[in-house]
Amino acid sequence: MDSIAMAAIATQSGGATLVMLLTVFVLAVFVGFEIITKVPPTLHTPLMSGSNAISGITLVGALVAAGAGAGVLSTGLGFAAVILATVNVVGGFLVSHRMLDMFRKKD
């Protein structure tokens, strides 16, 4: 569902939609936590690589938001998003590299 349709539904049904959206959010958090805790340690590095790829896409979106020139607030929030997404990507790669070093044979 796109954001316009969700906004239209939210204005028509009032608080019931908000409760439904919050319920979906809480269930998604619970399911995500349960799935991540059940992953064996050997699969954490590939999952980190996938997360880094998603963070890279977030960085591209933040660059688009910062460069849109839609106003000072939009540009400021886009710049903050660029900084946070960059920290996330770099940190993810550092953690992935450190985890891969754990599996290398020592000379």
Image: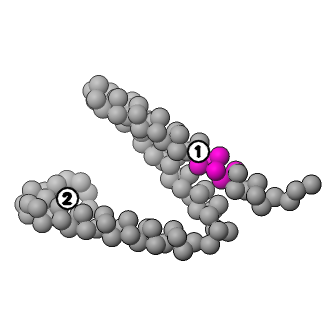
Quadrant of the image for the C terminus? Answer: bottom right
**Magenta extent:** 91-97
Q: Is residue 34 above or below residue 57?
A: below
Tag 2: Cα neighbours inside 10 Å, few (<14), some, or many (≥20)? few
Percent position of residue 54, x then y: 50, 53
Taking depth in this image into account, of 83 and 107 the one nearest to the observer is 107
Element type where label 2 sits in the image: helix
Quarter of the figure with residue 5: bottom left
| Residue that label 2 marks | 6
Q: Quick check: is 47 in the magenta stretch? A: no
Residue 52 location, x and y as percent? Answer: 56, 51
**Would you place residue 101 above or below residue 25 in this image?**
above
> Residue most toward the top?
72
Look at mark 1 in the image and give the residue it sits on: 91
What's the colour scheme? one colour
Question: In x, y percent, where is residue 44?
Answer: 62, 64
- Horizontal side, residue 98 vs residue 11: left or right: right
Residue type pointed to by label 1: Gly
- What main secondary structure does the magenta stretch of the protein show? helix
Q: Earlier in the sequence, mark 2 or mark 1?
A: 2
Q: Residue 89: image x %, image y %?
A: 55, 45
Q: Residue at x 48, y 41 (%)?
A: 85
| Residue at 45% over, 68% down | 33
* Distance between the alpha carbons at the discs numbered 2 and 1: 34 Å
Q: Which dot, 2 or 1, sits closer to the camera?
A: 1
Count the marks: 2
